[in-house]
Image: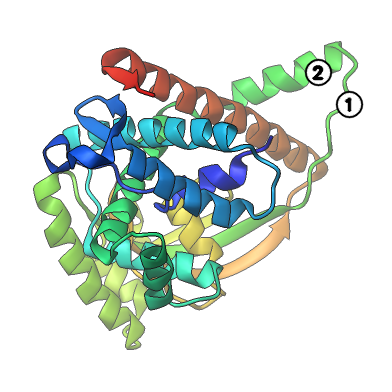
Amino acid sequence: MNFKTLMLAAATGLALHTAQASEIKQVDGIAAVAGNEVITHRDVRQAMAEARSFLGKNNVSENELRTQVLQQLINQSLIVQAGKRRNITASDAEIDNALADIAQSRKTTVEGLYAQSAKIGVSKAAMRRSIADSIITQKVQQQAVMQHTRVSDAEINAFIQGAARQGINLPQGRPLRQYRAQHILIKADNPKAVQAAESSIRSIHKQARSGVDFAGLARQFSQDGSANNGGDLGWFSDGQMVPEFENAVHDLAPGQISRPVRTQFGWHIIKLVDVRDAGTPEERQREAVRQYIARQKAEQATASLLKDLHQSAYVEIRR
């Protein structure tokens, strides 16, 4: 059974928040202990109900679904705890943006989401906590992936040469979708700087949206090396920027300015200048190979993260 849809539900925060031990009511019963937190049977039931809403009529047994849901809740709990130890947080603005994106994907409103969750016993506050935990989860995972998924030219060369020796024909690859963008970065190097950086970027964003010259704002405020060039990043392809930045670019049409975006580097606003399909046959093939290697590394990095967290934490599944 393919549980990608279920995993997406958990990743977007709709697998429900595990409660602190001090908040557990005895009648809930404990399904699992994960590090310093417990997961109740109620948490599992609610998450299963949410998963069912994604899976629809898929023929998944209750036991199979419960096993997958419980493991996902344990994994998320361990990752969130690791994120909080690293002072990784989710701001109210990030939670609001995530809710808006989820509502749009479900063709409803944020209030509609709250109403749907209330039907399965999840309060507005609990849903927001769940979204926050999911944002922290994504940030921790992205950190692990970004640290280990850079693909060098030497790796691409070795892969292509190895395929040639084995007589394997590599795909030619699709035309490269390339983007040209400008951005403004306000760095947030430590937890205390995050709030100030967010306040600054939102002020700059208002100016940019009101028609103030973006390049001028970049020269004046941006803390990135591209500031002297008006924030111009030149042409880049998918996989060259961190995921949050790329996702924001994908949502833009040429000339549009993004809402503030937080990455591991700080807070950005992005203006998409142009989009093109380009690349020689060799460049397209190399890009296809790069993406394949990067996907393999991302899977390995995520697996290693979870393995390390499980080895360093106490985990007990109860019946």
Mark 2 sits on what residue?
Answer: 163
Query: Residue 45 at x, y = what percent?
Result: 42, 45
Q: Is residue 194 above or below residue 148?
A: below
The disc labelled 1 sits on which kind of residue? Answer: Asn
Q: Residue furthest bottom?
A: 210
Q: Quadrant of the N terminus?
A: top right
| Residue 171, quarter of the rendered image | top right
Label 1, label 2: how far apart the Cα atoms are: 7 Å
Q: Residue at the location (39% across, 24% down)? A: 319
Q: Residue at the location (69% across, 47% down)? A: 58
The disc labelled 2 sits on which kind of residue? Answer: Ala
Q: Residue at the location (50% across, 35% down)? A: 66
Tell how many labels: 2
Along the viewing direction, whichever of 229 and 211 lies nearer the viewer: 211
Looking at the rendered structure, which numbered label has been put on residue 169? Answer: 1
Residue 287 is left or right of residue 239, and the answer is right
Query: Helix, strand, or loop for circle 2?
Result: helix
